[in-house]
């Protein structure tokens, strides 16, 4: 089982919510705050991310970077898709 996490470039996000629809783990939500462009931005809402990269692939603004870590190791999380 792979564990993952994402980093969202908050000020690049335009709040289209495509990543929320694409996430099979339902682990992305929209923030209550606005970014510098006046949009609510995507953010991780729990720790169920598997690092599948779906969210990064559908983001039209390449605002998401995905990191993965095999569950069986204690090594540092490695980049899975450098899409920022
Ligand atoms: S990498 Fe996959 S599981 Fe993780 S937030 Fe993106 S779509 Fe969801
Ligand atoms: S798909 Fe990209 S631009 Fe759209 S809400 Fe998600 S992070 Fe923001």
Image (cartoon, grey):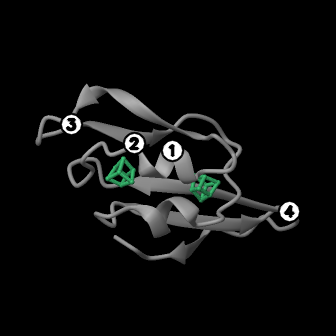
Measuring 88% from the left and 65% from the top, which residue is drawn there? 72
Q: Identify the residue under disc 4.
A: 1
Q: Secondary structure at mark 2?
A: strand
Question: Sequence order check: which comes first, mark 2 or mark 4?
Answer: 4
Q: Does any atom of ligand 2 lie closer than 8 Å to the CB of label 3?
A: yes
Q: Which mark is residue 64?
A: none
Q: Quadrant of residue 43?
A: top left
Q: Nearer the viewer, mark 2 or mark 4?
A: 2
53 or 21, nearer to the observer: 21
Q: Secondary structure at mark 3?
A: loop
Give the class, few, some or many, for how many residues have Cα within 10 Å of label 3's Cα (few <14, many ≥20): some
- Nearer the viewer's eye, disc 1 or disc 2? 1
Label 2: which residue? 42
Crowd rating for badge 2 (residues with CA inside 10 Å; few <14, some 14–19, many 20+): many
Q: Nearer the viewer, mark 3 or mark 4?
A: 3
Circles 1 and 2: CB distance less than 8 Å? yes
- The mark nearer the N terminus, 1 or 2, is 1
Instruction: From the top left corner, tell me how far across and down residue 68 is, in percent.
Output: 65, 67
Q: CA distance from mark 1 to mark 4?
A: 22 Å
SS category of the residue bearing label 1:
helix
Queried on whether the Cβ of the residue with tag 2 lies below 8 angstroms from ligand 2, the answer reads yes
Q: CA distance from mark 1 to mark 3?
A: 15 Å
Q: Residue at x 33, y 67 (%)?
A: 62
Residue lying farthest left? 37
Question: Would residue 36 be found to the left or right of residue 41 on screen?
Answer: left
Residue in view at x 32 percent, y 64 percent: 60
Where residue 66 sits: x, y (%)? Answer: 53, 64
Disc 3: which residue = 39
């Amino acid at each position: 089982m792979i564990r993952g996490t994402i980093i969202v470039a908050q000020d690049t996000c335009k709040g289209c919510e495509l990543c929320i629809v694409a996430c099979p783990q339902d682990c992305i939500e929209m923030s209550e705050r606005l970014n510098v462009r006046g949009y609510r931005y995507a953010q991780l809402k729990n720790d169920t991310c598997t690092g599948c990269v779906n969210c990064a692939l559908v983001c039209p603004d390449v605002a998401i970077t995905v990191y993965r870590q095999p569950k069986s190791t204690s090594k540092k999380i490695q980049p899975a898709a450098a899409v920022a």
